[in-house]
Amino acid sequence: MLSWSIFFLIVALIAGILGFGVVSGTAAWIAQVLFVLFLIVFIVSLFTGRSTAPGV
């Protein structure tokens, strides 16, 4: 998910440089949404991840 976010960020930057405002805005919005989703899933996985007791 993080790789998709980075991909859309790069697309947004290139589109912004080339002057495609709508494409740039849309790609940046998608990148932002994917990054927030990645952060949420990452934080949830930190709290609910596997934790094994020592010696078990």
Image (spheres, helix red, strand yellow):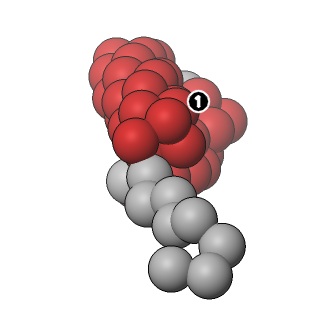
Q: Nearer the viewer, residue 5 or 43?
A: 43
Q: Nearer the viewer, residue 47 or 13?
A: 47
Image check: 41 left or right of 46?
left
Q: Nearer the viewer, residue 46 or 34?
A: 46
Q: Is residue 29 visible?
A: yes
Mark 1 falls on what kind of element?
A: helix
Instruction: Count the labels in the image.
Output: 1
Q: Which residue is mark 1?
A: 16
Please report the residue visible at 62 percent of the width from the left and 82 percent of the height from the top: 55
Hey, which residue is sitting farthest front in the picture?
A: 55
Looking at the image, residue 56 lies above or below residue 30? below
Where does residue 4 sit, x and y in percent of width and height?
A: 40, 55
Please report the residue visible at 51 percent of the width from the left and 80 percent of the height from the top: 56
Where does residue 6 sit, x and y in percent of width and height?
A: 56, 51
Q: Is residue 27 visible?
A: no
Q: Nearer the viewer, residue 25 or 29?
A: 29
Amino acid type indicated by mark 1: Gly
Answer with the quarter of the image where residue 27 lies.
top left
